Image (cartoon, rainbow, N blue to C red):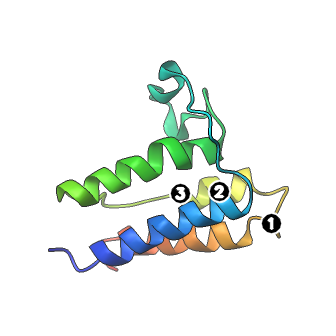
């Protein structure tokens, strides 16, 4: 088993927690069309918070639970820095967690 699995799983829970703390967690599921977006980060159909909640977290959870190969890289922080540029203080913890996720997912971690 990849030694990063448990740490990545913990980070996914921390990311979910921070989305909830900030009030960025949604109780409303996006449409099937929005969820089927093939555009990076689904920017054409949902906001970044929704993408984290409805695409990123479930997909990473599935990868961990099924023992699938981890991605070789993650550039999620770059997107977060852009999305949250207007709320740097409010998004500080989430961006920190996403930066750590990017480091964990890197093969050199």
Q: Residues within 10 Å of mark 3 (few under 14, many from 20)?
A: some
Image coordinates of residue 62 in percent, x first then y, are: 29, 51
Q: Which residue is mark 3?
A: 76
* Residue at the far left in the pictured view: 1
Q: Which residue is mark 1?
A: 90
Label 1 – label 3 distance at C-alpha: 18 Å
- Tell me if I can see residue 96 in this picture: yes
Q: Are marks 3 and 2 in contact (CB under 8 Å)?
A: yes
* Residue at the far top in the pictured view: 33
Q: Which residue is mark 2?
A: 80
Residue at 54%, 49% (x, y): give it: 52
Label 1 – label 2 distance at C-alpha: 12 Å
Label 3 – label 2 distance at C-alpha: 6 Å
Residue at 38%, 71% (x, y): give it: 8
Q: Is residue 12 above or below residue 1?
A: above
Q: Nearer the viewer, residue 87 or 21?
A: 21
Q: Are marks 1 and 3 in contact (CB under 8 Å)?
A: no
Q: Residues within 10 Å of mark 2 (few under 14, many from 20)?
A: some
Observer-side mark, 1 or 3, equals 1
- Helix, strand or loop status at disc 2: helix
On the rendered structure, is 69 left or right of 89? left
In the picture, which quadrant includes the N terminus? bottom left
On the rendered structure, is 28 left or right of 73? right
Image coordinates of residue 101 in percent, x first then y, are: 47, 69
On the rendered structure, is 49 left or right of 60? right
- Helix, strand or loop status at disc 3: helix
Residue at 74%, 65% (x, y): give it: 91
On the rendered structure, is 73 left or right of 85? left
- Helix, strand or loop status at disc 1: loop
* Residue at the far front in the pictured view: 27
The quarter holding residue 80 reads bottom right
Observer-side mark, 1 or 2, equals 1
């Amino acid at each position: 088993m990849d030694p990063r699995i448990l740490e990545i799983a913990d980070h996914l829970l921390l990311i979910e927690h921070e989305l909830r703390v900030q009030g960025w967690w949604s109780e409303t599921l996006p449409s099937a069309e929005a969820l089927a977006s093939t555009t990076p980060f689904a920017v054409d159909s949902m906001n970044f918070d929704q993408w984290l909640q409805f695409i990123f977290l479930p997909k990473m959870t599935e990868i961990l639970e099924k023992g699938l190969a981890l991605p070789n890289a993650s550039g999620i922080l770059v997107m977060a820095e852009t999305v949250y540029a207007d709320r740097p203080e409010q998004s500080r913890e989430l961006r920190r967690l996403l930066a750590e996720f990017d480091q964990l997912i890197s093969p050199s971690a």
